Amino acid sequence: METSTKAVTSPADRTGRFGAFGGRFVPETLIAALDELSAAYEQARQDPAFWAELDTLLRDYVGRPTPLYLARRLGEAAGVRVYLKREDLNHTGAHKINNTLGQVLLARRMGKRRIIAETGAGQHGVATATVCALFGLECVVYMGAEDVRRQALNVYRMRLLGADVRAVESGTRTLKDATNEALRDWVASVRTTHYIIGSVVGPDPFPRLVRDFQSVIGRETRQQLQTLEARLPAAVLACVGGGSNAMGMFHEFVREPSVQLVGVEAAGEGLDSGRHAASLTAGRPGVLHGSYSYLLQDEMGQIAPAHSVSAGLDYPGVGPEHAHLMASGRAQYVAVTDEEALDAFERLARLEGIIPALESAHAVAYLLREGRRWADAGPVVLCLSGRGDKDVAEVAALRSRS
Amino acid sequence: MASGFPITSFEVDPLAAPFADWRARGHVALIPYVTAGYPDPGATADLLDRLAAAGADVIELGVPFSDPVADGPTIQRASQRALEHGVALPWVLDQLAAFRRRHATPVVLFTYLNPVLAMGVDQFVEAAAEAGAQGVLLTDLPVGSDPELEAAFERAPLALVRLVAPTTPAERAREIAARAQGFIYYISRTGVTGARAELPPELAAEVEALREVTSVPVAVGFGISSPEHAAAVARVADGVVVGSAVIDAIDRGGPEAMQRFIASLRRAIDER
């Protein structure tokens, strides 16, 4: 099977909107760079050589296509026929590298020699540091000081790969603040630097550009299931923090009304506890990090701290296209708690011999709880966005405390 | 009068007349910034009075936001401190209304979109005008980002102050100038706010280039931290914006030190 990273359509309109959501709410200093990036992407999209280079790297360097694996024991436990889309088997251990490879090729086309990125769990930081090593580019990764503590292994990996990891001490010291700091760096360095944003968030063109680079997930899934079962899935499920693995899975199926799209957010200690990261399920629209989308915020429009046991979901915003898919009723967004995610982390390990990332474990938890709703309609496909090695120490510490 | 303002702009642009008057007299505006509620809410009224007394022509009053991506460490810290004191937009408008009963000095509210969206744009522009604001500057509402939203500010009786950056192409600068109200805020450097030791050497040429495409008054800010900087900027611009350095002065010696600093900027500008 081909990896087939073809140029894809971008339903975001000229001003980068998905319905009411999205846009470009950034300091004036960045507008020229966003125009430059949009133009470079438009050119690249129409250049077969760009996609050929990306396809080759995805195949030979990342290891795509990733398997679509029929998880029999998980399916028995969940009461539904379920396939796992094994993004955890990508080089660097998560879906993030699909995007960083695409963006680093764009940066090269724009002649930018310095790369910056934000990271939460560290997976995007590792994926960015990896492609910078591959192409010999300078790499600076901003990471909340709290996440530096929670994800020590990934910090070491990034440094090993040659990245300069900067701990961010401002605000809540997590992904939101790392993103602020990366944006501030970019405001000052924009002439020489490309910002590889890690999810389908931020100002246009990032949400559509990251989605397009991640949409290889859904395209492969469709072809693989066609080969295996000659049908479309009844539903596709994915965890949603910023929402890049979910958009990557959903995009191929948005125009197939028979396929349910389900995004699983982090309910943290419970939606009523005020300590969660469920922007879509429990937030309100507003502007953060350059786009109009759902946010966790107080009545005065100050951004509220997010909480999740999973650093990659610990973000008070979400990609604007998800906000649009929710508002239009095309996708459904649900939330599971830290506790449910931790249980799912352990159950998938024992049922399938696969240790999922805590982020992905949220989707597994929802499947275990509600999978029976597709018992007669199945199969369903769950995007296993990353591997859980990075989380083992943190989970062990949490479990020994309780 | 050679100000070049269309007559209609006076109706919705309360800063047009003062800037036209200043330009006619060869007076360069001093535009200091303070974060409302910093270092504590009790200090704000006195700080505003002192800015007016020391010769501010326009005051930029910062409404703190939790995630100020256009701001460097000084204003980030001031904003965070104000928020810890519970400062919010309605309180800032109350402070402004009280100041307006004491002084006529024009005030521009300097903030980010989200606190304004949370209040509601129509409600905000009405409340801000009612409180006595002459303008609003939203760092994350660049020209063209949301025509409907921008129009809501533009038709309100407040000047919507727009920014031009060193990275803004000439054609876009012209587009921004065509829609500018009040004054154009020229960002002196490619970066976030914060006091700097030196002004960029190319600044004067950049401001001259901007003047070639517009007759709208141009104020320059970002990084201006000393009377020498202020005088140098005043030789090429209609206004001098000083932000982080004002906060630094408050940190150094409280309200008196701030007032002395503002007065020294005033002198330097007038004697340029």
Image (cartoon, grey):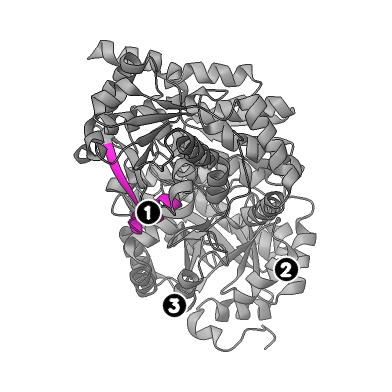
Q: Nearer the viewer, residue B251 or B117?
A: B117
Among the two numbered marks 2 and 3 on one chain, the one whose residue lies closer to the N terminus:
3
Residue linked to disc 1: A257
**Amino acid type, mark 1:** Pro
Mark 1: few/some/many CA within 10 Å (<14, 14-19, 20+): few
Task: Kindly identify which numbered label has been placed on residue B211.
Answer: none
Q: Residue at x 59, y 73 (%)?
A: B180
Mark 2: few/some/many CA within 10 Å (<14, 14-19, 20+): few
Judging from the image, mark 1 belongs to the subunit labelled A
Spot occupied by residue A129 in the image (x, y as percentages of width and height): 62, 27
The answer to whether A338 is drawn above or below residue B160 in the figure is above
Residue linked to disc 2: B171
Q: Nearer the viewer, residue A315 or A73?
A: A73
- Image quarter where the C terminus of chain B lies is bottom right
**Horizontal side, residue B246 vs residue A262: left or right:** right
- Image quarter where the N terminus of chain B lies is bottom right
The answer to whether dots 2 and 1 both sit on one chain is no
Judging from the image, mark 2 belongs to the subunit labelled B
